[in-house]
Image (cartoon, rainbow, N blue to C red):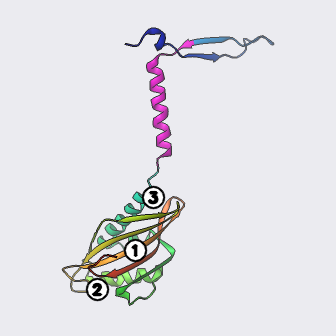
Amino acid sequence: MIPNAARNLAVVAVKYPFDGMRGEAASMRYERIGWRTRAACLLLACVFSLAACHRTPAEQAIRDTVAAMQKAGEAHDVDGVIAPIADDFVGSGDDVGGEILDRKSFRRYLTLVQMREGGAIHATIGPITIEMQGTNRATATFTAVFTGGAGLLPDDGQIEHVRTGWRLDGSTWELISAEWKEGAGGR
């Protein structure tokens, strides 16, 4: 039990406007505020300040973007895969003969793969390792297993080791580079 003296420690001065007589001092009224009211106000202030400062950490935002791209790819949504890719994107991989792909040619490549696979593309992405370079750049590496059908991808899976570069643009992370190599060994 908290003693009455401790419960009513806070005294707040509430200043009222002049009584209408010029030159008179403003009247002051004192009110006591209970400890429960003070605690509730403090708790609300903490909640509002935390809500205002909440931002998805960079690493989680990149993981979420990779997952959204994977989901879009499996849903045959090329636009969804391309959406987080920056206009100045540069990519290359073993299956394109080491050719450098920009955003536009990467889109064509994805469309070609989807057409050849008849839309039956599935991707399983392994753990993503993210290394931050300052506050607005990051590198994400992971292994992906792609399965398809009678087209470019084998039924039993094709393992790719992927290294991606990311840049923070405002509040969104953009994919600025990607390199993928086929193989069973790690990098």
Q: Circle 1 sits on which residue? A: 163
Q: Circle 3 sits on which residue? A: 58
Q: Circle 2 sits on which residue? A: 116
What is the spatial separation of the Cα atoms under label 2 and label 3, in whole angstroms?
Answer: 35 Å
Q: Quadrant of the N terminus?
A: top left
Q: Amino acid at mark 1?
A: Arg
Outermost left residue: 156
Label 3 residue SS: helix
Label 2 residue SS: helix
> Compared with residue 33, is residue 89 higher up or lower down, i.e. above or below?
below
Q: Quadrant of the C terminus?
A: bottom left
Q: Amino acid at mark 3?
A: Ala
What is the spatial separation of the Cα atoms under label 2 and label 1, in whole angstroms?
Answer: 25 Å
Q: Is residue 81 magenta?
A: no
Mark 1 and mark 3 in contact? Answer it, CB < 8 Å: no
Q: Point out the frontmost of discs 2 and 3.
A: 3
Is residue 74 found left or right of 29 in the rendered image?
A: left
Choose the circle earlier in sequence order: 1 or 3.
3
Picture quadrant where residue 125 is located: bottom left
Mark carried by residue 41: none
Q: Point out the frontmost of discs 2 and 1.
A: 1
Q: Is residue 117 visible?
A: yes
Span of residues in magenta: 31-54
> Compared with residue 1, is residue 139 higher up or lower down, i.e. above or below?
below
Q: Residue at x 42, y 81 (%)?
A: 106
- Could you tell me what secondary structure mostly forms the magenta stretch? helix
> Compared with residue 56, is residue 98 higher up or lower down, i.e. above or below?
below
Q: Is residue 121 visible?
A: no
Mark 2 and mark 1 in contact? Answer it, CB < 8 Å: no
Q: Amino acid at mark 2?
A: Arg
Choose the circle earlier in sequence order: 2 or 1.
2
